[in-house]
């Protein structure tokens, strides 16, 4: 397994729409394992392949308190959404240290392939529902800051670019 580089906002590659996985093979399983290792090392709850510059429809997540219940979603699609909405603070491994409120469906049902290529469906509420919607946005080339006002988005963009410049000069 290997730690992967997580792209940082406003990297334009984060806006690439991911393509469906044609076959769940050893390459995809290796990607899943590397993504899980990367997500856990970064102390995140979810990671989309887009964030590690692989533009295929793969998501890994673990919203469990014990951090030992990974969920793999390959070619996920939301098959049901609640009408009721909820607002919660979101953060993102591609936008480190930034958190803000985002409005999302309170419950969703998702259909996907697992790590072995088997189809399954899962209903989700709470943090898991938020995480599924957040990571699926990544597969569509959307970062959570795009739900925020243009003013907030510009401030975040400026802060992230400044941080990247500072990291370059100290490296």
Image (spheres, rainbow, N blue to C red):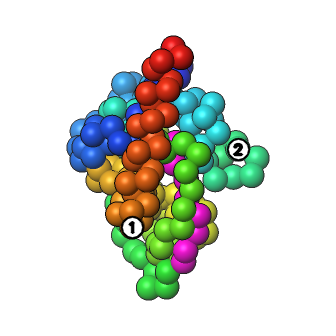
Q: Nearer the viewer, residue 13 or 80?
A: 13
Residue at horizontal 49 percent and vertical 85 percent from the top: 84
Say if 82 sits above or below 1 in the image.
below
Residue 20 seen from this side: no
Give the labeled residue for mark 1. Answer: 149
Determine which of the numbered discs, if any, sits on residue 67 in the image. Answer: 2
In this rendering, position of residue 118 left or right of residue 89:
left
Label of residue 13 in the image: none
Residue 25, by quadrant, is top left
Give the Cα separation between the discs numbered 2 and 1. Answer: 33 Å
Which secondary structure lies at badge 1? loop
Q: Which is more foreground, mark 2 or mark 1? A: 1
Q: Nearer the viewer, residue 166 or 112?
A: 166
Mark 2 residue crowding within 10 angstroms, few (<14) / some (14–19) / many (20+): few
Residue at image coords 25%, 43%:
16
Q: Position of residue 71 (x, y in %)?
A: 55, 48
Is 33 situated left or right of 55 in this image?
right
Identified at 40% across, 74% down, the residue is 80
Q: Is residue 41 left or right of residue 151?
A: right
Q: Is residue 147 magenta?
A: no
Nearer the N terminus, badge 2 or badge 1? 2
In front of the other: 55 or 89: 89
Q: Is residue 90 magenta?
A: yes
What's the magenta bit mostly, secondary-structure-wise? strand
Left or right of residue 161, residue 101 in this image: right
Label 2 with label 1: CB-CB less than 8 Å: no
Q: Residue furthest bottom?
A: 83
31, above or below 70, in the image: above
Within 10 angstroms of label 1, few (less than 14), some, or many (20 or more) residues?
few
Residue span colored magenta = 86-93
Q: Position of residue 78 (x, y in %)?
A: 37, 65
Residue 76 percent location from the top left of the image: 37, 54
């Amino acid at each position: 397994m290997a730690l992967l580089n997580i792209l940082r906002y406003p990297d334009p590659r984060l806006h690439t729409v991911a393509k469906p996985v044609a076959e769940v093979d050893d390459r995809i399983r290796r990607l899943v394992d590397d993504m899980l290792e990367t997500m856990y090392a970064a102390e995140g709850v979810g990671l989309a392949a887009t964030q590690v510059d692989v533009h295929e429809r793969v998501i890994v997540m673990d919203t469990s308190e014990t951090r030992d219940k990974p969920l793999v979603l390959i070619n996920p699609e939301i098959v049901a959404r609640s009408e009721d909405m909820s607002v919660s603070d979101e953060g993102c491994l591609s936008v480190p240290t930034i958190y803000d409120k985002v409005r999302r469906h309170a419950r969703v049902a998702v259909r996907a392939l697992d790590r072995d290529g088997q189809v399954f469906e899962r209903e989700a509420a709470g943090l898991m529902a938020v995480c599924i919607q957040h990571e699926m946005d990544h597969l569509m080339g959307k970062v959570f800051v795009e739900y925020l006002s243009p003013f907030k988005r510009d401030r975040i963009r400026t802060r992230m670019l400044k941080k990247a410049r500072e990291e370059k000069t100290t490296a």
